[in-house]
Image (tube, grey):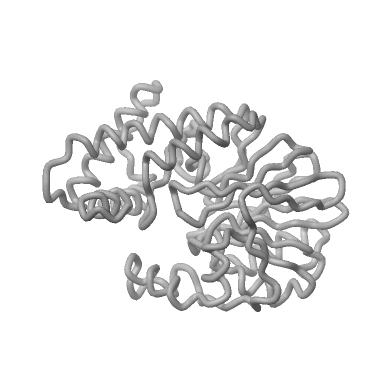
Amino acid sequence: MPIIDYGSDIYGIDLFEEGRPFRSTAYVIKDSEIALIDTGSAKSHQVLLDGLAELKLRAEDIDHLIMTHVHLDHAGGAGQMMQKSTRALLHAHPLAAEHLIDPARLEQGVRRVYGEQTTALFGPLMPVDKNRVLSRDDGEVLRLGRRTLTFYHTPGHAKHHLCIGDDLGHAIFSGDMVGIRYHPGYTGWDFTYGFPTTSPGDFDPEVMLASLDRLQTLHPRRIFHTHFGVTEPADEAFDFCRRGVHYIQELIGRLPANVTYELIYQALSQIIAQDLQRLGHKVSNTDPLAVDMMLNSQGILVYIQKKEAGKL
């Protein structure tokens, strides 16, 4: 089981999301109390348990589960994990907490995107006992021992998104907020690439930029991405994510009325290909990013439709 030791008692567990390495990470923080940030989907549950075992930990040893947001590749396995982590408390954004306690509406929303493939892709959703869920306000802290974690409400990717600041490691656990870091082991390319994630249904480019600005004022040294691994120095992650959002804003500005998903996907593919070229990377196509381009195109389309309807 691939375990990455990032120093400062922070460990990454490759969750093999999508059945592939280098896609999603769960982060374990060891201190007087032990925290787990994101669980991955229910499909990754056994992989997560095996990773903990490699770190000489059992599920019962976890004191705190922290969910950056409730998209299923981040929190779909929270219910299963909480059943085994019998002493743990679960920490989430107030808007996320309600979906973890009762995932029925969350599942309906996911099925609108993935249809009949939902269970096969992510596994079953299980509720979490409401008495073990803590809704975390913006700026609240959690002390683990030597280190203190701070919760930041960071909308833009999702209205219910939390980022977690780590004072000891001078780091931010960013979930999906500061983009996706594409590892060469995932893409097959010989370089690391970064781009924002705009999946449905709460993407808002202006709000995302505001959240990025706020996080950058904290001056972190490292960004721990759920997808995948660490960007250091952190400013590199802010730069690639902000650059990508600006590209998307330009794309939206030149799209015709009554735009289709297919047209957005084509335009987004061109933007990423051009970005890769500007960065000096010679690749023949953007196929390794096809899953995310599909989701990102849907998210951009939903944003356009909401804006036109005055629902932002």
Q: In this view of the protein, can residue 284 be seen by the observer?
A: no
Number of numbered callouts drawn: 0
Q: Is residue 28 left or right of residue 204?
A: right
Q: Residue at x 22, y 45 (%)?
A: 264
Farthest-out residue, left: 257
Judge by depth and name the residue closer to the eye, 236 or 140.
140
Q: Is residue 255 above or below residue 2?
A: above
Judge by depth and name the residue closer to the eye, 65 or 143.
143
Q: Residue at x 38, y 39 (%)?
A: 206
Quarter of the image holding residue 10? Answer: top right
Q: Is residue 2 left or right of residue 99?
A: right
| Residue 166: percent from left, percent from top | 72, 42
Q: Residue at x 29, y 48 (%)?
A: 300
Quarter of the image holding residue 135? Answer: bottom right
Judge by depth and name the residue closer to the eye, 288 or 263.
263
| Residue 74: percent from left, percent from top | 55, 59
Split into 4 quadrants, where in the image is the N terminus?
Answer: bottom right
Q: Is residue 275 above or below residue 34?
A: above
Q: In this view of the protein, can residue 282 be seen by the observer?
A: yes
Q: Residue at x 64, y 58 (%)?
A: 136
Quarter of the image holding residue 216? Answer: top right
Q: Is residue 112 left or right of residue 54?
A: left
| Residue 287: percent from left, percent from top | 33, 44
